[in-house]
């Protein structure tokens, strides 16, 4: 594919000289907080829980997400690597990371198309016009922006984020200020379909994939503490400002359909703002999906393709499929893939911070911003752990036991630690990092490296 747009360091470390300041990355995080879907989520929870119970559910969900984001995201920041590249050195090896890349790319690009279709249907319901036309407009605009990587996505953040939260403030002033806040908080729920735990499951589960792929964003951070502050700020805004405002709106109107209220108070200007905010959230799906495709193709076919060109190809494919409604039939399949992603985070955390059998090779090359010449090939023990944790998540999701995404993540972490202690996490051989390199000839593995711990540090 021809080089179009930005490759955005898809297969290498992000150099220190190319990283962004605190505010720029913060805008990307906060941009993920602003959407009407979070209002609707808040209103849905508000119908089944009282205000303080809803606040407890949002708190639990946010804490779970922040723990995952920090540990996975810090690793991405420290190494300057995307999530799929990070997996090559955190338990999966080069070949196992190809499976990770394929699953993540399929899931995210699929959801890009699904969300694009939802956007088209929403625009059709709000102002008319054919659904397919709105899908094409949104899909093409997002593809062009994501083609230029983090820098292109930053432009829509700079525009959409201030406008969206200005809209929130205006909605609160014009709608909620006409009623007694004390009375709204004290209103009992109309239904009793949820518990605090089940509501927290919905909250944490809804963004867990975003938490796992945090390195795709945090690799552009200059400092490790930026990860915690930026993601924490985003979650506070998303869960408390947007989510709990949705709870109050749900109490006020007695329905989860609060979209009409938000748009009704702001007219055409509000509609434009919502369009921008919706697009800002969906651009991450296409961006991380494109990184996964680049990594998969390089590993399996030994071909290095340009991330910008991949974005164009798959963005247009997702746009067309959403316009004809094709992807709506694959929501169950995409949801199944989503359950397979949280265990990846558990394995990354266990290997990067505790086991460090494969991760240690990154230490020697971090300062000069290169990557090790060789990496583990297949690591059968890791794949077995991943499969078992995925099964745990699927079963607990099917029977509604606990928080499935957390169940699978913790299962993966614990099993990986136990398997490592038992000497079961062994590479079948080392291979060159790049399939096209002369170093790709496999060499005998000398046995697992000693288990060690290393404290997190901010470079």
Image: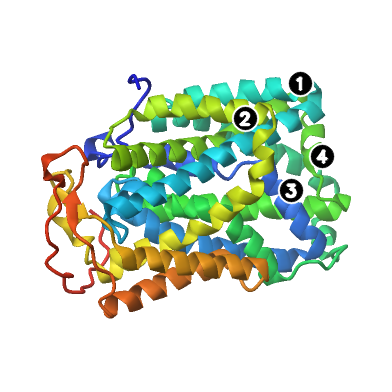
Provide the residue designation for mark 3.
Answer: 40
SS at mark 4? helix
Left or right? Give the position of 120 relative to 68. right
Out of 402 and 433, give the one closest to the viewer.
Answer: 433
Discs 1/4, front: 1
> Label for residue 321?
2
Q: In this figure, which colouring scheme has been used for the structure?
A: rainbow
- Give the mark, 2 or 4, whose residue is nearer the N terminus: 4
The residue at 48%/54% (across/down) is 211
The residue at 58%/55% (across/down) is 336
- Give the mark, 1 or 4, whose residue is nearer the N terminus: 1
- Give the mark, 3 or 1, whose residue is nearer the N terminus: 3
> Label for residue 130?
1
SS at mark 2? helix
Discs 2/1, front: 2
Q: Is 436 located above or below residue 421 in the figure?
A: above
SS at mark 3? helix
The residue at 38%/63% (across/down) is 383
- Give the mark, 3 or 2, whose residue is nearer the N terminus: 3
């Amino acid at each position: 594919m021809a080089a179009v747009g930005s490759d955005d360091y898809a297969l290498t470390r992000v150099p220190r000289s190319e990283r962004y300041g605190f505010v720029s990355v913060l805008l990307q995080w906060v941009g993920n907080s602003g959407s009407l879907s979070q209002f609707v989520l808040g209103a849905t929870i508000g119908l089944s829980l009282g205000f303080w119970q809803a606040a407890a559910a949002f708190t639990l969900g946010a804490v779970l997400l922040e723990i995952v984001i920090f540990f996975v995201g810090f690793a991405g920041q420290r190494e300057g690597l995307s999530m799929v590249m990070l997996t090559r050195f955190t338990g999966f090896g080069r070949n196992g990371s190809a499976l990770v890349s394929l699953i993540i790319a399929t899931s995210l690009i699929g959801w890009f198309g699904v969300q694009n279709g939802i956007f088209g249907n929403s625009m059709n319901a709000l102002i008319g016009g054919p659904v397919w036309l709105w899908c094409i407009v949104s899909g093409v605009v997002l593809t062009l922006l994501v083609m230029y990587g983090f820098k292109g996505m930053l432009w829509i953040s700079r525009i959409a984020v201030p406008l969206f939260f200005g809209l929130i403030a205006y909605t609160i002033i014009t709608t909620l200020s006409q009623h007694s806040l004390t009375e709204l908080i004290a209103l009992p729920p109309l239904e009793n379909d949820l518990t605090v735990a089940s509501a927290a499951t919905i909250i944490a589960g809804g963004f867990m994939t975003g938490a796992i792929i945090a390195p795709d964003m945090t690799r552009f951070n200059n400092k490790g503490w930026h990860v915690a502050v930026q993601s924490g700020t985003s979650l506070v805004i998303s869960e408390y400002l947007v989510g709990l405002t949705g709870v109050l709106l749900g109490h006020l109107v007695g329905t989860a359909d609060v979209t009409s209220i938000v748009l009704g108070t702001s007219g055409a200007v509000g509609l434009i703002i919502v369009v921008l905010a919706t697009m800002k959230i969906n651009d991450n799906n296409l961006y991380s999906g494109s990184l996964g495709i680049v990594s998969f193709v390089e590993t399996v076919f030994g071909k290095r393709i340009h991330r910008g060109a991949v974005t164009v190809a798959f963005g247009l494919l997702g746009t067309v499929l959403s316009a004809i409604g094709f992807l709506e039939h694959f929501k169950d399949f995409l949801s199944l893939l989503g359950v397979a992603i949280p265990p990846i985070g558990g394995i990354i955390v266990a290997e990067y911070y505790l086991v460090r059998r494969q991760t240690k090779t990154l230490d020697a090359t971090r300062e000069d911003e290169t990557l090790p010449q060789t990496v583990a090939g297949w690591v059968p023990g890791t794949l077995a752990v991943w499969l078992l944790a995925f099964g745990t998540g699927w079963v607990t999701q099917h029977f509604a036991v606990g928080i499935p995404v957390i169940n699978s993540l913790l299962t993966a972490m614990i099993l990986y630690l136990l398997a490592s202690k038992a000497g079961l996490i062994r590479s079948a051989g080392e291979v060159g990092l790049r399939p096209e390199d002369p170093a790709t000839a496999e060499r005998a593995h000398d046995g697992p490296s000693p288990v060690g711990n290393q404290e997190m540090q901010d470079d």
